[in-house]
Image (cartoon, rainbow, N blue to C red):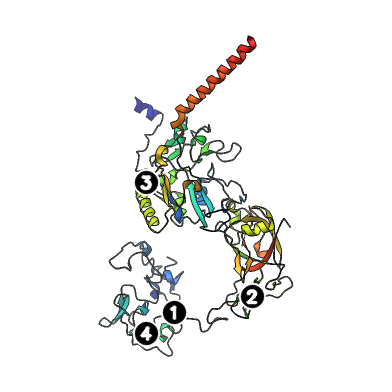
Amino acid sequence: MEMNGYTVRDGKQVADFAALKDDGSTACGVWIYSGVFPGEGQNMARRRNKGDGWISPEWGFAWPGNRRMLYNRASADPQGRPWSERKKYVWWDAAQHKWTGYDRPDFPDTKAPDTPGQEEGVGVDAHSGSDPFTLKADGRAWLFAPSGLKDGPLPTHYEPLESPVKNPVYRRQDSPIAKRFSRKDNPISAPGDPRFPYLATTYRVTEQYTSGSMSRWSSWLSELMPEMFAEISPELAAEKGIKNRDWIVVSSARGEIECRALVTRRLRPFQLNGALIHEIGLPYHWGYKGLVKGAMANDLVPLSEEPNVYIQEDKAFTCNIRKGRL
Amino acid sequence: MIDAYRRFMNIEAPPAPQRPKGFFTDTSLCIGCKACEVACKQWNQLPADGNELSGNSYDNTGALGATTWRHVQFVEQAKANNSRVGQRWLMMSDVCKHCANAACLEACPTGALVRTEFGSVYVQQDICNGCGYCVPACPFGVIDRAPKDGHFEAGRAHKCTLCYDRQKDGLEPACAKACPTDSIQFGDIEELQAKARRRLADLRARGETSARLYGMPESTEAAEVGHLNAFFLLLDRPEVYNLPEVPRLPRKTMAQRYAISAVVGLAFAALSAVAFGRRSG
């Protein structure tokens, strides 16, 4: 009920998010699920009426407001007529002066297609009756983001800050606006640095959860993935004289860790500019506490951030390996 | 008289048999997440078996055993060694097969192993005396005794119960409930078999020509152990998944084995008679 929303005075569930007010008289945990429990004992998600058409609006619940397709006003042309008879989905019913169709229209119910946008209008009132993308500032579809991003507006290719190769697309090697932390303990090795000839990537395994600090305390999860390991290809293993389960040391410009080698054909060397470049796969779930412990892949990754939402770049960097322990 | 005795001894009538239920494990849908292993251990409160990296792909629990009743195998396969041609990663969640003719049940001298009203094979822990006859009898190597020095039901035989307790309450087994891809499906065995045949036809039509069902009433592996109440859709030969081509029922060869033992025994007797005869003569 908290998710569906209710009127504060009497605790009654609201019918859907249109009934929510911003004056404190209603409360709602998450507006997109508003309407899933519209009344006592009613759970819209449990409905199983297949119906005649292919939309089945009475089968389960789709957020928001049980709409099966977002921005579905775009299935009709600016005058509100379906673009094609075969694909008709929602349309303007001039006789009844409202939007109708197979799905619940994702548009103000009685806003006619020829309604002009209000210059000073707030929210969807600023949009005209032919602007289907109601959650966009201008109500229009965007092929790219013209503003708001620090890079862009169109995607391009830069190499990671650490890469074994030169950028094959531009003279510019890496993102000019990546957030860098130039410190003595955070060096970045240059492309082709002979000390770190291999690629490394980090990932999770399904058995441990994110950093592992929660799941490493569960014996049932720990037995499934009990130890830090590095996945290497049989080719690289042969070159370095490493056998499956041997201890190896993985090093980068920032640090070095020891772990077991897991030799597998699933790791495939890359052919880059005619050179064979090996890749090392590192899961990152272990640490110094828990039922199972192990070295941290994060000790190797460079500290740098993507410029928009500051996601750390730890999916690609360069490293070296040797047989043995620290 | 018997009724009075039953009442006096508080012996309940066995529950009426129901339509047999079982698992259809479709390995083509398995993603190797091991949720089934964890759900099984959690529901049945089975201890972990130890924390050791096996080095065998992502499989660190090794095999089915007394405290591992679901086990996910990982097979890294290619057309030839040191080649990546036709490379694929097969995953398969293995479990007790609950055979129609169960070798463990036949071998059990105490009556601890029973056929339940749901068609599954169940070890009654209060009756099992830990003799272990069932362990070598199982052609799949499923059932096992818990170590005597362990803290889990020491010494007795254990295996998948097909979540008998959950079935009693109308719930599906924990592994099938947890499986995110429906690789493990639970239900009426005849319905599952029909479903499996449709799925196989579908996969073959899509070019998975080596796909096959394992443990159907009509297939070769049913020759001795009968159909399996936990059966599989495999993408390769059974050996690839550590399953026997034809699982054998020890009973079938018992007469032959007794005869061989008798012949060998007689031969030794004759040999010693000759030896003793010489010395004393």
Q: Is mark 4 on a helix, strand or loop?
A: loop
Q: Mark 1 points at which residue?
A: A135
Q: What element carries label 2?
A: loop
Q: Name the residue under label 4.
A: A130
Q: Is mark 3 on a helix, strand or loop?
A: helix
**Same chain check for tags 3 and 2:** no
The answer for how far apart the CA atoms under marks 4 and 2 are is 48 Å
Asked whether the beta carbons under mark 3 and mark 2 sit within 8 Å of each other, the answer is no
Q: How crowded is mark 4: few (under 14 residues within 10 Å), some or many (20 or more)?
A: many
Which quadrant would the N terminus of chain A be assigned to in this image? bottom left
Name the residue nearer the viewer: B123 or A246: A246
The answer for how far apart the CA atoms under marks 1 and 2 are is 41 Å
Q: Mark 3 points at which residue?
A: B189
Asked whether the beta carbons under mark 1 and mark 4 sit within 8 Å of each other, the answer is no
Q: In this view, does A249 lie to the left or right of B218?
A: right
* Residue drawn where x is 67% and y is 58% of the image: A239
The answer for how far apart the CA atoms under marks 4 and 3 are is 56 Å
Q: Mark 2 points at which residue?
A: A166
**Same chain check for tags 1 and 2:** yes
Identify the mark nearer the N-term, 4 or 2.
4
Q: Nearer the viewer, mark 1 or mark 2?
A: 2
Q: Where is residue A303 in the image (x, y as percent from the top left)?
A: 66, 71
Considering only vertical position in the picture, is A262 above or below A75? above
Asked whether the beta carbons under mark 1 and mark 2 sit within 8 Å of each other, the answer is no
Considering only vertical position in the picture, is A237 above or below A180? above
The answer for how far apart the CA atoms under marks 1 and 4 are is 14 Å
Name the residue nearer the viewer: A155 or B265: B265
Q: Which amino acid does label 3 sit on?
A: Ile
Q: Where is residue B51 in the image (x, y as percent from the top left)?
A: 62, 49
